[in-house]
Amino acid sequence: MWTPPVSCVPALIQAQTGCHKKVTVWRSQERERRVSADFVAHSAGQLEFAGRTVRCVLGKGGTVPAADKREGDGASPAGTWPMRRVFYRPDRVPPPETGLPVVALSPDDGWCDAPDDPAYNRPVTLPYAASHEKLWRDDHVYDLIVELGYNDAPPVPGRGSAIFMHLARPDWAGTEGCVALPYLDLLDVLRLAKDGSEVEIRI
């Protein structure tokens, strides 16, 4: 079983917050701007929760208002999104401890990203004719995935799909719009997450 590298986990920065259940991700340097959130995190590469601040990565296309988010723009949609469920690679990592529903991935799992397809922004079983993303990958970024409830109730064609929390790449490369962080930090987030927990992405 693959052990995710710990080298990507930065030193912890102490913060005066308690354990919460909403995650707020900030894109710009606004450390002084506080919000009353249940499970708070900051970005510009920082995510804060349970008295800790850890590094995270957002979309390589920046962060945009949700109304401006488009399929394939590589941007993270600003807003508050529920944490739906967790997917994990059973051949690489154990099931995480969490209050969210947990689903083991299989090689035929995919996610449709074709705006004109009825299954847009929905999980699909492979092979699948329309454009899709494979969830069973050769790299490790999808070894642990949190599905975020962005553009899913119902999906609006072209407004973006597959917005997840997942594992950060070793080089901290920007995502396609997701929130990425190291394995151990994502495990800590999941231990606190439960039904009703949310991720907030801020510009």
Image (cartoon, rainbow, N blue to C red):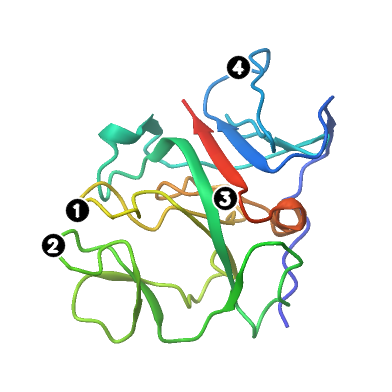
Q: Residues within 10 Å of mark 2 (few under 14, many from 20)?
A: few
Percent across and percent down for residue 62 are 41, 33
> How far, Cα to Cα, is label 2 from label 3?
28 Å
Measured Cα–Cα span from mark 4 to mark 1: 33 Å
Label drawn at residue 30? 4
In the rendered structure, find residue 180 and report the number of the disc placed on it: 3
**Identity of the amino acid at label 2?**
Asp
Residue 59 vs 64, above or below: the answer is: below
Q: Which residue shows up at 64% across the image and 83% down it? A: 90
Q: CA distance from mark 4 to mark 2?
A: 38 Å
Vertical arrangement, residue 30 with respect to residue 115, above or below: above
Secondary structure of the residue carrying numbered label 2? loop
Which is in the foreground here, disc 2 or disc 3?
Answer: 2
| Front: mark 4 or 2 | 2
> Which circle's residue, 2 or 3, is located before the other in the chain?
2
Q: Is residue 82 left or right of residue 97?
A: left
The residue beneath circle 2 is 116
- Quarter assignment of residue 25: top right
Residue at disc 4, secondary structure: loop
Q: Is residue 128 left or right of residue 183?
A: left
